[in-house]
């Protein structure tokens, strides 16, 4: 019975040491971990856009004043079919 308790004690110590070690690693490297996650999110968003933003910018008029009416206001888009 004593051997069983010794094995359980050693296993418990190993698990506790692993948890403390992992927590210390994350705490000490939290800035670099945050930066890596931020870069992955930015790359994911860029990939999901599929160049939609780039094509929208390329198709925009070169002169923003060209879309204005006589009063200097840009007209709002209308909803088709009177919805």
Image (cartoon, grey):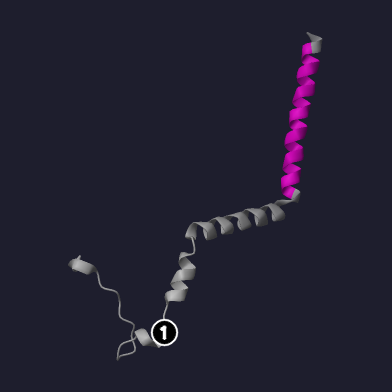
Most extreme residue toward the top, as rendered? 1
Residue at mark 1: 64
Quadrant in which the N terminus appears: top right
In the image, which residues are magenta?
4-27
**Is residue 14 shown in magenta?**
yes
Q: Position of residue 7 (x, y in %)?
A: 79, 17
Q: Tell me what residue is drawn at x 77 percent, y 15 percent.
A: 5
Vertical comparison of 35 with 19: above or below? below
Labels in figure, total: 1
Q: Tell me what residue is drawn at x 78 percent, y 33 percent.
A: 17
Q: Position of residue 55 (x, y in %)?
A: 46, 70
Vertical comparison of 46 with 64: above or below? above
Q: Tell me what residue is drawn at x 29 percent, y 74 percent.
A: 77
Question: Is 67 situated left or right of 35 in this image?
Answer: left
Main SS of the magenta segment?
A: helix
Quadrant in which the C terminus appears: bottom left
Q: Nearer the viewer, residue 46 or 75?
A: 46
Quadrant hosting residue 71 = bottom left
């Amino acid at each position: 019975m004593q051997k069983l308790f010794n094995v359980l004690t050693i296993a418990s110590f190993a698990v506790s040491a692993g948890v403390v070690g992992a927590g210390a690693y994350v705490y000490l490297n939290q800035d670099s971990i945050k930066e890596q996650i931020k870069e992955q999110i930015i790359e994911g968003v860029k990939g999901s856009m599929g160049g939609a933003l780039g094509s929208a910018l390329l198709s925009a008029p070169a002169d923003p004043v060209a879309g204005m009416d006589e009063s200097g206001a840009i007209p709002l888009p209308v909803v088709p079919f009177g919805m």
